[in-house]
Image (cartoon, helix red, strand yellow):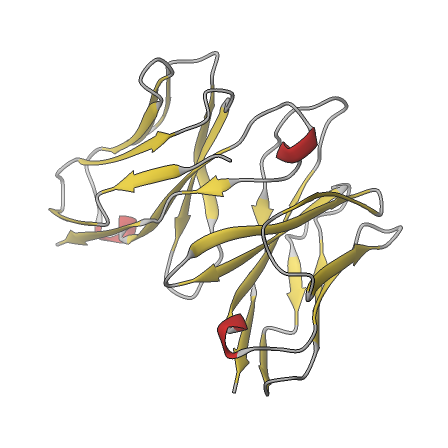
């Protein structure tokens, strides 16, 4: 089955700096890659996602890049703010039905701390 | 639209008991997935339901089961509780367009289950 590795497990930055979180996946059939942000005691919330027919997607301060050949994708947060502090999860899925229905395989998470 | 809701939010049970958790998806969403979140194992897929049918199942023992009703509300049941079942149980709903295509999953707030 699919396996997703996420690095680093913790990341500490100063306000205004950029933060990068990287994930690698094992199943070359995966073609949908969402990123979730989970604040303490709250539900995971989708912040951005990308499909395999696109190499990069950007939404204001957040961007995701995908390299299908290397099977890795990355989250980039620019101009970080203290409210960006949370746990970030990457995930992978694929559009073939069957054993993929409704299943996201998650990375282990990255605790991001943005210091004022 | 109202978001995904889960009840109860907190549960304390003892070993050997059984528990039922409930999830109400976003109106119009037909797919409900369940995940277990623990500090050690992260977010792990339990199962997914669509149109009252389980379409996919993760690697959990048979003590974990679920069902979906005609209004898309879903329940999961854990029988013969073990200490290791203590976790945050999250459900996520998605619209699921026709044909195989991974849609955005929107998470509920979770049910925190503690097994003593």
Residue A108, placed above or below residue B13: above
- Tell me residue B84's x, y (percent): 49, 73
In the rendered view, would you say B77 is above or below A27?
A: below
Q: Position of residue A82 (x, y in %)?
A: 22, 52
User: In the rendered view, does B1 fall on the left or right side of A54?
Assistant: right
Q: Quadrant of the C terminus of chain A?
A: bottom left
Residue B94 vs B87, above or below: the answer is: above
Q: Is residue B74 visible?
A: no
The residue positioned 62% from the left and 77% from the top of the image is: B81
Relative height, residue A69 to residue B49 (above, below):
above
Quarter of the figure with residue B18: bottom right
Side of B30 relative to A79 (left or right): right
In the foreground, B88 or B62: B62
Examine the image and state in which quarter residue A17 appears: top left
Residue at point 31% right, 18% down?
A70
Q: How many marks?
A: 0
Residue located 13% across and 54% down the image = A115
Which one is in front, A23 or A15? A23
Asked whether residue A84 appears in the rendered view, the answer is: yes
Picture coordinates of residue A47, whole percent (x, y): 43, 38
Q: Is residue A68 left or right of residue B3?
A: left
Counting from the top left corner in percent of width and height, residue A94 is at 56, 26
């Amino acid at each position: 089955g699919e396996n997703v590795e996420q690095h680093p497990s913790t990341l500490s930055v100063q306000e205004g700096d950029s933060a990068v979180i990287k994930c690698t996946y094992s199943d070359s059939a995966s073609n949908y890659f969402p990123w979730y942000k989970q604040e303490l005691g709250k539900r995971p919330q989708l912040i951005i996602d990308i499909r395999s027919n696109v190499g990069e997607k950007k939404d204001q301060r957040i961007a995701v890049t995908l390299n299908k050949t290397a099977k890795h994708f990355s989250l980039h947060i620019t101009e970080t703010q203290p409210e960006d502090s949370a746990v970030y999860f990457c995930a992978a899925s694929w559009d073939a039905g069957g054993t993929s229905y409704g299943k996201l395989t998650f990375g282990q998470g990255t605790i991001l701390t943005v210091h004022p | 639209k109202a978001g995904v809701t889960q009840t109860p939010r907190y549960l304390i049970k003892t070993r050997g008991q059984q528990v039922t958790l409930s999830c109400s998806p976003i109106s119009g969403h037909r797919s409900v997935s369940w995940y277990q979140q623990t500090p050690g194992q992260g977010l792990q897929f339990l199962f997914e339901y669509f149109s009252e049918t389980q379409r996919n199942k993760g690697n959990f023992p048979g003590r974990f089961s679920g069902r979906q009703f005609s209004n898309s509300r879903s329940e999961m049941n854990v029988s013969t509780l073990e200490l290791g079942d203590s976790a945050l149980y999250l459900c996520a709903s998605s619209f699921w367009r026709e044909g195989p295509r991974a849609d955005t999953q929107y998470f509920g707030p979770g049910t925190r289950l503690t097994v003593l």
